[in-house]
Image (tube, helix red, strand yellow):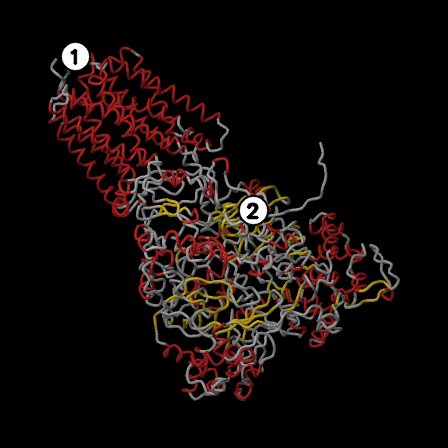
Amino acid sequence: MKQMDIGNREDHGGTGISRRTFVKGAAAVGVSLTLGSPALRALSTNTADASRGILQGQWKSTFCTGCTTWCPLQVYVENGRAIKTRGHAHSKTNGQYCCPRAHLALQQLYDPDRVKTPMKRTNPKKGRHEDPGFVPITWDEAMGMVADRIMELRANRETHKFLLFRGRYTSVNSMFYSSVPRIIGSPNNISHSSICAEAEKMRYFLDGQWAYMQYDISRTRYVLVWGADPLVANRQVSTALRNWGDALDNARIASVEPRLSGTGTKCDEWLPVKPGYDGALACAMAHAILAEGMWYKPFVGDFRDGQNRFKPGQTVDEDTFEEQHTHGLVKWWNLHLKDTTPEWAEKLCRIPADQIRRVALGFADAAPRCMVWVGGGPGMQPRGSYGCMAAYALNGLTGGIDNEGGVLAYNSTVYDSLPDHDDFVDDLAKEGNAYEKIDQRGRLEWPNLARGESGAGVNTNNVADAILNEDPYLPKMGIGYFANFNFSCPDTQRWFKAMQKLEFFVHMTTHASEMSWFADVVLPVKNCMFEQWATLNHSSNLHASAAISSPMVDSIWDARAMETEVPWLLAEKLAERGFDNLLRYYKTFRDPETGREPASGSNLDLYSLKIRTQKMWDPKKHEGGDKFQNWEEFKKIGVWNSDRYVYRHRWSNMGTKTGKFEFYSETLKEALENHAQRHNVSVDKVLEACNYEARGEVAFIPHHENPHEWGDPEEYPFKFVDYKSRLNREGRSANCPWYNEMKDVDPGDLPYDDVAKLNPRDGNRLGIRTGDKIRLTSPTGSIVCTASLWEGVMPGTVAKCFGQGHWAYGRYASKVFGREPRGANNNDIIPADYDRLSGSTAFYGHIRLKVEKV
Amino acid sequence: MSKIWFGLLAAGVVLGAFAALTVVSRGLGVYNLNDVTFWALPMSGYLFFALTAAGLTLLSSLPSIFGLKEYYPFAKRAALLAFATLLVGIMCKALDLGPMTTLMNTVWIGLSPNPSSPIWWMAVLYGIYLTFVVIKFYFLNKGEWHSSWSWTAGLLALGLMIMSYTALSIVFGTADARPAFFGHFTALYFAVTALASGMAAIVLASFVQSAIRGGMSFQEEQAFDKVAKLFAIILALALFTFLLRHIIGYTSLQADFLGFRHIAGTGIYRTEMLIGLVIPLILMLIPAVRKSAAGKVAASVLALTGMFAGRLVMLLSAQVKPIGVMTENRPEIVTYFPSLYEWGIIILALSLCLLIYSLGVKFLKLEAAPQS
Amino acid sequence: MPRYAMVIDLQRCGGCGACITGCKNENNLPEGVRWSNKMTETLGTFPNVRYYYRPTLCNHCENAPCVRGCPTRALHKVEGGITAHDPRKCIGCRYCMVNCPYGVINYTWNKPHAEWEDDSEVIPECTMSPREQARLMNVQSWPLFNPDPDFNYQSIRPAGIVEKCHFCRHRVVNGELPYCVEVCPCDARIFGDLDDPGSLVSRVLGMFRAEKLRPELGTEPRVFYIREFCPCVYEPGKGMI
């Protein structure tokens, strides 16, 4: 099968009969033989309900909120009940293919523990061990309470003390997430982004993409999966699963990861890198590629005389090298790479030098059809930015960027913008909006350089400290939606205290969760995949697609759509209290077809979607991709696909300062200098304040930084490796029965259990066996879980999935709801630390542990 | 004495009936069974009682069919005991199928027969066998020892015993997927152990009766000594077969025998070997003990206990090591401990069996033998 | 009459378990029961360690020992060689479980989906009990109830009998692929007719030396495995003394 079927799955050669046509034909014979005549059928005992036929329902369009890939999906609905899901048959991205977590969405929808009515707290005391004493209230009462609080803030001119926490969202989120705080007068819309993957986006400083990428797996010849687990979790899992079998034929695949990941089990080789040393490994690979003269010359360029001057330990004259689509290669070499030999790296990252060299050269040999698939692993560490950049820079050396078989940007999605709220921000609100954001972003020690802009990125996990220290101020009320920060942010204890300190908190959620536990009012929201109008976009397989969902199932809960119906109710309540700006703003969301003004939340729900997708369904506004006659046709199909990706359109047009792929990042240099200037300090001072080792020009190149670890190696001899289960729907599937029952689809895990995996050598040394209860203690906290001895774990490390340890997430997720968790939450032991350039919260590389048998 | 005895039996029946009714209404979920170990205590009750019935049927046929007239004193008693044990054995199996809905499905044994299925033959043959055991006892009870009807019924009962026992052996013998059922070797093993448990049962039953009635006739006593000798021979044969099985189980290269080896290390295996075979054999080899009533009673009680353990040994050997996909997420060897409901079924079977026999003792003159 | 078979391409298989969940979804399987399942093993020692994953299901053996041993023909062969099960004839004797060398038949010990008859509410009056939810949704068993298997099996098999994979016969006779094939995001499962030389199963079986599970038992499985879950590479060498 080698070298066959590149990117052309449908055409297998031979007969042109599709599998389905064949089955239908063959089955028809079978049916006619066995069930054909009524007489025969009567004799068969197996025809309980043969007259009914099958598949009487319909496949309806939606998307998946199980990870940020947002695959277009279809839901099989019969009599108002969702029964099955699959990939979206009309999408050109994942097609009918969907990863296993898509199916769990159904159990999220029909979770027995969904909140069925608004409820309010009766126990004024808040705390992890305080039962809130929730009682049901009406929507009217609930929204009245929320509106009263907001009016109070406005009356006291302290609207900045309003917070809006956003977890997951849909594509119309700005009308709630941005507009509500601004119109009220608060700068504080706090997203979850920095606990998601911001450090991964530091690739921006090399190739201008502050974004997730798509990966051209079906055309690649070498995949270096780096701190990513594409067959398991984020990105484009569905498409990765679909194409991986062919990729194994056509490409060499290696996994760089401290544990044998789900993807690692499907790779040609595994490079078990010591946690925190990704940068060293990547720089050694870059060194080897340069020293052997194997960089991809059509992209990078070459020495003017064609002679390779990259000799270990020797600097090179910049003028001797002429770059093509890159910038600063020789500077990178001179500043760092000349010394980062594989032998140097072996001592740090524990990968044998010959393996480093072999993989690096094999990778370069496949250039340009090669890719480093960089996930959160190397970046989501203290000082992680540079490791992430180092791994990603290999794409630049080999031209595997914006190229066949390489790493590609998302195709753009032609979403239209929603009406602007600026006209509805009054002076009082402007005054509030001018306050410093609660998360302290932009301070000297928080550059958060999203898109290169000082203080542009969010600092989610720091909000807890800001509240506790009342710095810059103590917020008075908060609304959280689709979020559960006091479970999902490291060092949860701080969050418990911070949530306790918030005077009034409103949680908008489908299930009661740990965040609801601290809420004064809980508002039940719809599941946006099934119960409302919504859209999300996706990109893979050389296309982008945007799918819509609709109210397709009979809902038995008194829930409202989170970003449209709930704010509409709020707008009405505020208007009743004399503040109608929000309502007037929402009334500008006119139906693009009829021009009608929304008269209800459900109108707003639909119209906002129609506005957002107008360029997709309105032929007059068409800007590319699939063309539809009108809204009705689009609604029926449910997904819009972009045009096919054009390779190499970004070469020398990268969106960086030089437009090139920057090995020496002028873009980062500018961003850091701007940040330093803002605080009147030097760049070195910024780096010092942010806990990086680099000084001088090294700050602008990908390089190795020693990991910043928490805990004394003597006392805490193990390193913790946190990762995501293949059944995690971000953090929301723990109460799905299938989640617990199917937990063994994560290699080394056990059903109905939450295991920490140790190498058998460590287990034997400590007298720990599979099934034993063990306590993991870090300087931050300790958890108890089940041990599983597994060879896929590096000795000296403990690997455990994130996702369990809920104590208030429903009957299956908790052992005793409200009291006792099932399993343990990794965030209880992960110290709160950050990669401060990106603002990203650290989940890897810095956590030291001790392991004890309980 | 009699009142206490019947009171005990009634208590056993009531207790057991509660377990049985629970099973019939709620299903087998109340057992500690699972998809790896699914034939265990209730099934071993079936094997134990059905095989004891086989031994008893042979014993009761010795005088009439094989002309060994000295065994006449046991014939009727053995016939009744064969009926009682067979009945409760079949009951054990029924209570190992499922709730009422499942039991109703058993009509399909008749409506949708599968002659290639050993278990179908087993079900059918045991059904017919039970019928002839009843007919045979009916004639004996009427005193028709020598009528051709009686003789024919006796012969058919014997024939069906052999056939149904064969079917039972083949149920395990053809289980290619589970070598630790010891294949067709099980036929031999079942044969000798069935005889041993049948003999133990009759020895015990006769002495219990004579104890109640106060002594036995000279003729009876002579016959018992003969039975005891025969018992010893059978025990020796059974021990030989047991050792043979042990050797096979430990020398086979098939991984499936790990399950057997695991069970061989447990108490139930030692119970089968020591209490069921070795000690009774030693007792029966010492003439003084063999001749004493207490010795015979002790040997037969021990043998029966061991035989019961042996049935469980036989079943678990092939069911503690998961096979195929059942190995996933499970340890190499799984553990099994019966639930109270499973014990309840065994208590019901035992009490019911003893109740039938005791009623027989009381009302049916079991010591009857032909006059000449 | 076709001869249905499934070929599982282990190289394509991503080990994701979508087949297991999909099967439970389609066939309303009770908690703890998997018709589509997997066998895994981890070989070697760190860092030379590999994990293998093999999806499993009923092999629909040509010489099915479960069919041979079933006393009431509850297990029987139907169109295309599918090993079907008639829940109304099943007497729960579990002899099929003795005979099946693959461990793919399950007995239903307790009432299926009984968790939806629970009356507890995690937040009284604010969340529903499972029973209330099932009642409001008007489902008899569980919220994801799929009526389709009623076509020629039984959508929910009661407690007290066995149940097993039926190659999604209700779908196959209606011209749809078995659901595990349909949901596999990796195209690792190929379904088709062995008697049709042009079918993909026949063509693929002509290319690879397919593996059958426990062929020595003579069951002639109709589920075939091709290629390796993990095609590793290594540096060539002759080893050493």
Instruction: Measuring from the top left, give residue A606's x and y in whole percent.
Output: 46, 79
Q: Is residue A123 left or right of residue A196?
A: left
In the picture shown, does residue B72 fall above or below B356? above
Classify 10 Å Cα crowding around label 1: few (below 14), some (14-19), many (20 and above). few
In the picture shown, does residue B263 fall above or below A299? above
The chain letter under disc 2 is C
Residue picked out by circle 2: C205
Q: Nearer the viewer, residue A608 or A37?
A: A37
Query: What residue appears at the point 27 percent right and 42 percent down from the top-left corner?
Result: B111
Q: Secondary structure at mark 1?
A: helix
Q: Secondary structure at mark 2?
A: helix
Instruction: Measuring from the top left, give residue B212's x and y in whole percent.
Output: 14, 22
Q: CA distance from mark 2 to mark 1?
A: 76 Å
Instruction: Measuring from the top left, give residue A625's x and y in whole percent.
Output: 59, 74
Query: Can residue A814 be seen at all in this image of the molecule?
Result: no
Q: Nearer the viewer, residue B99 or B126?
A: B126
Residue picked out by circle 1: B219
Name which quarter of the figure residue A688 lies in: bottom right
Looking at the rendered image, the disc whose residue lies closer to the viewer, 2 or 1, is: 2
Q: Residue furthest right?
A: A305
In the picture shown, does residue A755 fall above or below B241? below
Query: What residue appears at the point 43 percent right and 42 percent down from the top-left corner?
Result: C103
Classify 10 Å Cα crowding around label 2: few (below 14), some (14-19), many (20 and above). some
